[in-house]
Image (tube, rainbow, N blue to C red):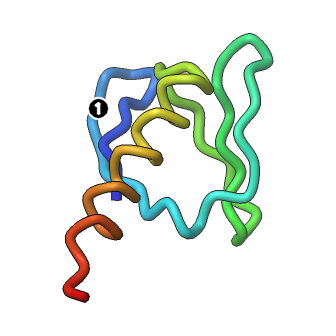
Amino acid sequence: MIYLTRLNGIKFMLNIDLIETVEETPDTVITLTTGKKILVQESCRDIQNEIVEFRKIIYCNLKK
């Protein structure tokens, strides 16, 4: 899960497995697999970086 900020300034956590698309129009719109759309302050690049960092934490700490 990653932290994001709604346009009204409220922070929330989003399960990244529910993300279907992220686009800037010019606001950043996240479309979930459920069809719900969320407007956030972060850019597409910022969201991508957060997802990559989250995945690194999850997958790099697996026991071999």
Residue at image point 27% right, 36% down: 11
Q: Eyeballing the image, is 44 above or below 14?
A: above
Place of residue 24 in the rendered image (x, y in percent of width and height, measured from the top left): 74, 21
Q: Nearer the viewer, residue 57 or 4?
A: 57
Q: Quadrant of residue 33?
A: bottom right
Residue at image point 75% right, 48% down: 21
Q: Nearer the viewer, residue 50 or 64?
A: 64
Q: Nearer the viewer, residue 40 or 21?
A: 21
Image label count: 1
Place of residue 46 in the rendered image (x, y in percent of width and height, measured from the top left): 48, 25
Q: Which residue is the site of mark 1?
A: 10
Q: Residues within 10 Å of mark 1 (few under 14, many from 20)?
A: few
Residue at image point 40% right, 39% down: 50
Place of residue 13 in the rendered image (x, y in percent of width and height, measured from the top left): 32, 52
Q: Eyeballing the image, is 38 above or below 39?
A: below
Q: Quadrant of residue 63?
A: bottom left
User: Left or right of 54: which side holds 52?
Assistant: right
**Position of the C terminus by quadrant:** bottom left
Q: Eyeballing the image, is 6 above or below 2?
A: above
Instruction: Name the amino acid, label 1.
Output: Ile
